[in-house]
Amino acid sequence: MAHRDELLQLMNSKLESSRVRDYCPNGLQVEGKAKVRKILTGVTASQALLDRAVAEQADAILVHHGYFWKNEASEITGMKKRRLQTLLQHDINLFAYHLPLDIHPDLGNNAQLGALLGFGDISALASVEPIGVVRQTQLSAAVQLTDMVALLQQKLERSVFVHDAGIGEIRHIAWCTGGGQGYIDAAAAAGAQLFISGEVSEQTIHSANELGIHFIAAGHHATERYGVKALGEWLATQTDVEVVFADIYNPA
Ligand SMILES: [Zn+2]
């Protein structure tokens, strides 16, 4: 068991969350009970994750995608009312870390995806702020696009969207998890032959063709499972709180 504020303190300092400017509050988004025995981690604080937390008698939820985004409506109605009501009725804390959990050098979504794919010598792309939101690696031997597609599909256990830019083999790979497809231009400028993100936009394909860089969209949810999972596992080593990861199905 740990106190809510102790958990908050531990995660805030590990992720240095106060140093990152973001589109949502990072840390404790909804206050619940003071004493926490069990935490449920997941990508997004959807109703399905909240219902799982209630069923599993979790005292806190820890996610990458929480609430209160910069441009969202401030009225508490409909879907938002039901979500907040579930949390408040069951006195469940909601912790959320967005950009701090994308960029962290060990626990971050981008670092974790690189590790999952077995990449060595991972560094941050210096041209994109906040530093760490796009990461890169230089391979010791060139690979084909089909090899990378097979690797991603095996590790993420799903099919991926592929665009072959017709530039041949790959030595330099850059990636940004989630909705990071807009960074394809920065990846091409850095000299990468492949850019991997979670989602694809119409304009991504034009950039791929005109800048000469292969592109793979491997799923927003699938590429962002690993940061929050790693943060939860780290938290379990720092306290005696039980931490359980829930992978709520999302094909996007
Ligand atoms: Zn995301």
Image: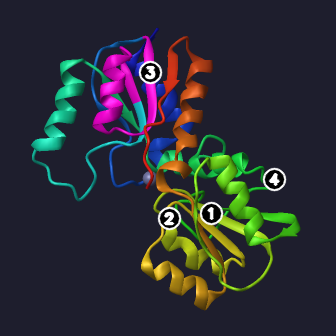
Mark 1 vs 4, N-terminal side = 4
Residue topped by disc 1: 175
Which residue type does callout 4 highlight?
Answer: Gly
Residue topped by disc 3: 39
Q: For the residue labelled by badge 2, is the local secondary structure a helix, a strand or a loop?
A: loop
Quadrant in the rendering for residue 153:
bottom right
**Above or below, comparing residue 41 to residue 148 in the picture:** above
In the image, taking residue 76 as reference, residue 54 lies left or right, namely: right
**Circle number at residue 180:** 2
The answer to if 142 sits in the magenta stretch is no
Q: Is residue 76 visible?
A: no
Q: CA distance from mark 4 to mark 2?
A: 22 Å
Question: Does the numbered disc 2 mark a residue whose Cβ is under 8 Å from ligand 1?
Answer: no
Residue at 56% over, 15% down? 239
Q: CA distance from mark 1 to mark 3?
A: 29 Å
Percent position (x, y) of residue 18? 44, 43
Quadrant in the rendering for residue 80:
top left
Question: Does the numbered disc 1 mark a residue whose Cβ is under 8 Å from ligand 1?
Answer: no
**Circle number at residue 28:** none
Percent position (x, y) of residue 45? 34, 38
Mark 3 vs 4, N-terminal side = 3
Mark 1 vs 2, N-terminal side = 1
Q: CA distance from mark 1 to mark 2?
A: 8 Å
Q: CA distance from mark 3 to mark 4?
A: 31 Å
Quadrant in the rendering for residue 61:
top left
**Quadrant into which the C terminus falls:** bottom left
Furthest residue toward right: 141
**Above or below, comparing residue 70 to residue 214 in the picture:** above
The answer to if 46 sits in the magenta stretch is yes
Q: Residues within 10 Å of mark 4 (few under 14, many from 20)?
A: few
Residue topped by disc 4: 120
